[in-house]
Image: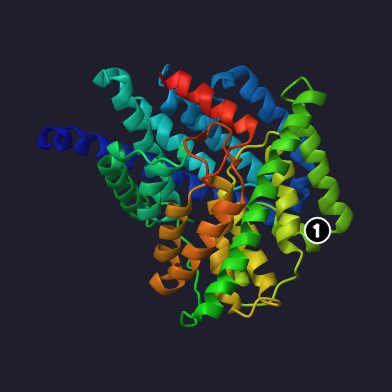
Amino acid sequence: MIRHLLRWIPIACYVGIAAGTASAILLASLTYATNLRESHTWLILLLAPVGWLMGLMYRHFGKTVEAGNNLILEQIHDPKDVIPFRMTPLILIGTFLTHVFGGSAGREGTAVQTGASLADQLTRPLRLSPQNRRILLMTGVSAGFGSVFGTPLAGGVFGMEVLAIGAIGYDAIAPCFLAAFVGDLVTRAWEPILPGIHHTVYSVSEVPGFNVRTILYASIAGVLFGLVAMLFARLTHAIASTMRRLIRRSEVRPVMGGLLVTTAVFGIGYAHTAKYLGLGIPTIVAAFHTHLPFYDFAAKLVFTAVTLGTGFKGGEVTPLFFIGATMGNALSSVIPLPASLLAGMGFVAVFAGAANTPLASTLMAMELFGAEAGAYAAIACILSYLFSGHNGIYHAQRIRSNKYAEQLPLTLEAKLQSEENADR
């Protein structure tokens, strides 16, 4: 055990430093991109041609890394080729372009990809075995996630939980947690140097005492959050599948997405749609304090599904935070729980259902909102996880066990059997 720790402590520290620095650069660049877009709204008109340039960039320089998060998960499940270093600059540039020209996307995907790709550069110099390389990649995922959101506990668990439904890889628990904490500290250390690096503070102002009635209300909300998470995942995948079927050239698909987003923004009116572009953090914060239009979560869902489904780069998680928080805000009109509590529950529960990561999501709620609100969030995350189905935002996520302990549908049985055969 001592030998194991002495080996992985310096590796995890390096991964944390690399991922934390990359997350700091990402956060600073997205702050600049958001300010630039809001100061020059005409940039949104260029989203379609920028999508074409982004598609060309990946077609000529990033074909092997275009799968993004799914490539990382596939390499963890079946380690083969080292992830090229160019994944890091490509995803940073692609995410920046998506945000500065008005796409609706997040940042988790970028942080996970930079963390894992930078970590994987150690594979050859250290001559890591496939099993140790698997741990290394999980460490990079944890470091990227924990550093970009300022939630190291959630990051440590996310790197182990996201791989498969119904299984957690505890063999990587020490390096994953260490890298997540180091990454978070490094990102915070960059704050005085790089402008725009900060983690948003979300506040749940009122938490009622536990009783049968409040637990029932929290459970109902969790079911609804799970259904919306399933809708988001299926819509995004359906758009991506349709684009691949109708448009053979990958660089043309973002053009279609850019045209759709731009038409919606200026057709409906920039004043009404601006909050659905980019990260949407001001609206997320507002969901904890003020009453918002009931349709905000649906609008953000569609804008994000179109943006990511047509090939723009970024992440899904911050948009899922937006969808969940604004949906919780809307549900406060019909579910008798405090609006800020429902916003916090939705913030993490929609993410839990879409990514199939209820434990990481619950820890995130406790880190962001406190233990009392985190207890309600745990109920919502578990119910959301159960009601979101077996499909999520990550294609490469495997199914290790059925969520419902019942007979699986034939397609899932076949998938499980094929994965078991591959493991053998």
Residue at coordinates 51% horizontally, 81% vertically from top-left?
Answer: 206
Q: Residue furthest front?
A: 407
Which residue carries the number 1 mark?
A: 270
Q: Residue furthest right?
A: 267
Q: Position of residue 370 (x, y in %)?
A: 40, 71
Q: Secondary structure at mark 1?
A: helix
Q: Position of residue 78 (x, y in %)?
A: 43, 22
Q: Position of residue 310 (x, y in %)?
A: 73, 35
Residue at coordinates 62% horizontally, 24% vertically from top-left?
Answer: 58
Q: Position of residue 31 (x, y in %)?
A: 55, 53
* Residue 402 seen in this snapshot: yes
Residue at coordinates 82% horizontally, 40% vertically from top-left?
Answer: 259
* Residue 104 seen in this snapshot: no
In the image, taking residue 290 as reference, residue 111 lies left or right, namely: left
Q: Nearer the viewer, residue 174 or 183?
A: 174
Q: Nearer the viewer, residue 312 or 76?
A: 76
Q: Nearer the viewer, residue 384 or 156?
A: 384
Q: Is residue 261 above or below residue 219?
A: above
Place residue 286 in its image quadrant: bottom right
The crowding category of the residue bearing disc 1, from other C-alpha atoms within 10 Å (few below 14, some 14 to 19, many at least 20), is some
Q: Is residue 254 above or below residue 162?
A: above
Residue at coordinates 52% horizontally, 35% vertically from top-left?
Answer: 397
> Which quadrant is home to the C terminus?
top left
Place residue 123 in its image quadrant: top left
| Image colouring | rainbow
Q: How many marks?
A: 1
* Amino acid on which the number 1 mark rests in the picture: Tyr
Q: Is residue 238 above or below residue 152?
A: above
> Which quadrant is home to the N terminus?
top left
Q: Nearer the viewer, residue 263 or 133?
A: 133
In the image, taking residue 269 as reference, residue 173 lies left or right, namely: left
